[in-house]
Image (tube, rainbow, N blue to C red):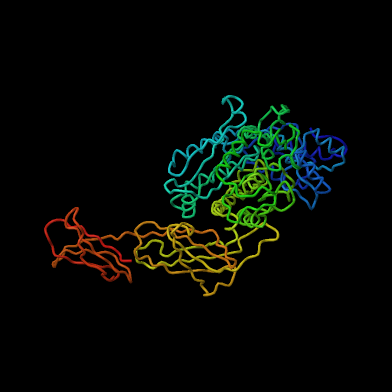
Amino acid sequence: MCPSSPRFQRIALAVALAFLRCHADIPLAGANPSAHSSHAAAAHERPAQARVEAQDGDCVVRLFYQDRDQLGHLVSRHDVFGPANHEAGYVMARLRPAESQELEEAGYKLEIDAGLTAQANARLQRAPAQSAGIPGLPCYRTVEETLDTLARIAAQHPDLASLIDVGDSWEKAHSDGQRGYDLLVLMLSNKARPGPKPRFFLMAEHHARELATAETATRFAEELVAQYGTDPEVTWLLDYVEVHILPMANPDGRKWAERGHWWRKNTNDTNGCSVFPSYGTDLNRNCDFAWGGIGSSDGPCNEVYRGPSPFSEPENQAIRDYVRSLFPDQRGPLDDDPAPATATGLVVSLHSYGQLVLFPWGWTPSAAPNHDALRRLGGKFGFFNGYTVQPSNQLYPTAGTADDWAYGELGVAAFTFELGNFFFESCSSFESLIDPANRLALLYAVKACRQPYLTPAGPDVVQASVWPATAQAGTLIDLSALADTTRSRGSTPPPPAQTIAAARYSLDAPSWVDGVQTRGLDADDSRFDSATERVRTLIDTTGWAPGRHTLFIEAQDTTGNWGAPTALFLWIEPLTLTSLVKLNGFAIEWPSVSNAFYTVLRWDAIGANPFVVERNLPATPPTNSLTEPIVTGARLYRVLIEP
């Protein structure tokens, strides 16, 4: 149990009450609900069917510090998590009984969070009616269910999805394959459209207890394949981008979390610690960039143990090798060498919790050389998920992290999303808040991955529409949209909004594809002079082939930056010919549109050359017709719309 010295006597009662509440829905004498923190209140928002079994053990506390140096010392020695409250001077930490005693004797102020302490010492149990998912939290798939989902997506969508085994978990690598798991990446892209293509890498479950991360990544994959062909945004992204998703980076540790343990590390018990549940290596302190610095520990039983050497763990070796295969090295050897503005590729690692969008550096308070561009892209993510955007070190120092490594070694724009407010987030919060908000942020990440340091500086295009959305070739189409440079949130100070300077569209391919022509849109008020502009143009569809077409709309600001395109579908209906036998001959009719001209071809026999019956025949809406003499035998007619 937590220490019972005078400093802890009062709050130990609250912890005991929290344990009792896990077992009974009755009022408890002496309990004061107003004394519970917001963490404690939300800890009891689990679904009613999620019963837990209380266990004695660790304490979750508000651990107070005097300055950033002291905070750095604490995060290098203890299991610190969540957003640090720098104004109040405390951070949340889970402490073993010996750690609590040590800190108390050293003069640190600790305040127990009763609700989180109860949660940290509880074990999950499957409800009687639950048939799938983590016990008591059915919205989260287990490791096995997640890997099965990836395999099913690849099998059902072979034109879009490939399942790639990138390596083994620690258990599998050290048991001759008898235990443990493969690390599986789902690659999504339209295989019929050749590359090379920009790449986006999404990783989750680096820390085992962060349940929402794997489910967010898996649902994102499911939604992409489900919406391909029907949603124009998803369709163009999978046509022109490769999306690589690793939902389970730490499957061995995750299995302990699925039983209710706040397991953080992998399950390596050969590095000097074999004490349950303290063994393992923190995979997000084991990467080879600033490895061994403040924010990590050399103690094998410590929760932020960095491992005996950089990339010592098989999970991280697999991730390292795969990420290197995706992205070229685009940054110089010095810490202050920036990646070029035109660098390509984007990495997002999902963690929890804290409602944060973090970017390099974590190992130093100094600004990363691409700081402004990273902050600008983070502000786009913050616009969608509502999270605070900041460098990782502003939270607290970390060393050997995946995002510092990806950016530091390769120059790839790299981010960490800290999802939600709990490790074991309630299903109601996950499904109503976390998943939908971060789905939009991840979709923007896919949009921006071609040039992540440039694209977010340009305007977004929203409220795009085309009318009519289905028409015959030759119809004038009204295309309109809103160009907006103000869509940023979460960073302080926010980037200044720029003035819109231009807008354009392209047909059936984005503007950067070789040979694609673009055409301009005009400001509705005839002047490009504000941060938001309604833009519009009329499009002549004469000569367009029947079928589905995609319009790509982009906007530019006065500094010359083009933003990410927004796509719309437009359908051109094929001409439908009808035939009539009249007194004066054989007539064909077809629907026509204003200002069009038609050519009518006739074949008198299969394999014969066509005969031009009429050329440049003017339209006579709503229908055109042509009459020919009745003859014996079959004839084939075709009507072409002149360009």
Does residue 217 appear in the picture of this structure? yes
Image position of 128 with respect to 594: above or below = above
Question: What is the total number of numbered labels drawn onto the structure image?
Answer: 0
Image position of 633 with respect to 426: above or below = below
Q: Quadrant of the C terminus?
A: bottom left
Residue at the front extreme, as displayed: 333
Identify the residue at image location x=72%, y=31%: 278
Q: Quadrant of the N terminus?
A: top right
In the image, residue 51 lies at what x, y percent?
65, 35
In the image, residue 621 lies at what x, y percent?
30, 70
Residue at the bottom extreme, as displayed: 526
Image position of 332 with respect to 78: above or below = below
Residue 608 appears left or right of 291: left
In the image, residue 424 lies at what x, y percent?
65, 40
Q: Which corner quadrant of the image does residue 2 belong to?
A: top right
Does residue 17 appear in the picture of this structure? no
Q: Which corner quadrant of the image does residue 167 belong to?
A: top right
Q: Which corner quadrant of the image does residue 478 belong to?
A: bottom left
Identify the residue at image location x=85%, y=38%: 104
Image position of 31 with respect to 340: above or below = above
Residue closest to the eye, 135 or 100: 100
In the image, residue 71 lies at what x, y percent?
79, 45
Residue 105 appears left or right of 570: right
Residue closest to the eye, 338 or 281: 338
Residue 201 appears left or right of 226: right
